[in-house]
Image (spheres, rainbow, N blue to C red):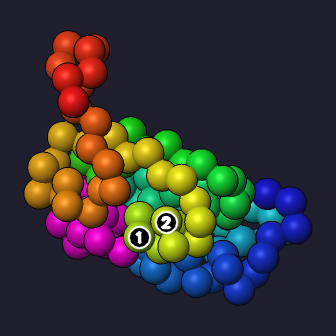
């Protein structure tokens, strides 16, 4: 990371409930010995910090616990959209299809709708 935005980093780490696990010092995370779910959330923090116009998440929430799965779909994706970002979220979890602006279904690699 270049020129880290410390307040943004701290806010994102808190949202992902990682603020007690790691921090950023000299543009590096202080701890990366985290559980698989925590590492995945830390990778998401890193992606958001890059502030790209388009985000592609392929089954990001699949192995997250219910709390973070719900946060991802119901809060984070909406926040990114409200910030003017384009988000492509691949999911098999039809419980959250309602958050999508558009749904594209595939079957065996072919678009079906």
Magenta residue check for 65: yes
**Where is residue 61 shown, x and y percent of the image?**
30, 53
* Element under disc 2: helix
For mark 2, does the 10 Å Cα neighbourhood hold few (<14), some (14 to 19), or many (20 or more) residues?
Answer: some
Which residue appears at 88% of the width and 68% of the height?
Answer: 3
**Where is residue 14 shown, x and y percent of the image?**
50, 82
Foreground pick, 113 / 106: 113
Work out whether 49 lies above or below 92: below
Which residue range is magenta in the image?
A: 63-75
What's the distance in space between the residues labelled 1 and 2, CA to CA?
5 Å
Is residue 21 visible to us here?
no
Magenta stretch: helix, strand or loop mostly: helix
Instruction: Give the quadrant of the N terminus.
Output: bottom right
Which residue appears at 48% of the width and 52% of the height?
Answer: 87
**Where is residue 98 shown, x and y percent of the image?**
20, 61
Which residue appears at 54% of the width and 53% of the height?
Answer: 86
Which residue appears at 21% of the width and 30% of the height?
Answer: 113
**Where is residue 35 shown, x and y percent of the image?**
38, 56
* Element under disc 1: helix
Work out whether 6 lies above or below 38: below
Magenta residue check for 106: no
Work out whether 57 lies above or below 86: above
Drawn side of residue 47 relative to residue 112, left or right: right
Drawn side of residue 23 relative to residue 19, left or right: right
Drawn side of residue 107 relative to residue 87, left or right: left
Contact (Cβ within 8 Å) of mark 1 with mark 2: yes
Q: Which residue is mark 2?
A: 81
Foreground pick, 38 / 8: 8
Is residue 4 visible to us here?
yes
Q: Which residue is mark 1?
A: 78
For mark 1, does the 10 Å Cα neighbourhood hold few (<14), some (14 to 19), or many (20 or more) residues?
Answer: some
Image disc number at residue 110: none
């Amino acid at each position: 990371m270049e020129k880290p935005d410390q307040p943004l980093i701290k806010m994102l780490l808190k949202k992902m409930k990682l603020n007690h696990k790691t921090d950023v010092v000299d543009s590096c995370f202080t701890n990366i010995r985290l559980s698989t779910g925590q590492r995945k959330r830390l990778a998401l923090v890193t992606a958001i910090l890059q502030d790209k116009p388009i985000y592609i998440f392929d089954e990001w929430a699949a192995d997250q616990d219910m709390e973070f799965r719900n946060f991802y779909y119901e809060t984070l994706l909406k926040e990114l959209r409200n910030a003017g970002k384009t988000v492509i979220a691949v999911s098999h979890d039809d419980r959250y299809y309602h958050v999508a602006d558009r749904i594209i279904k595939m079957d065996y690699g072919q678009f079906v709708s």
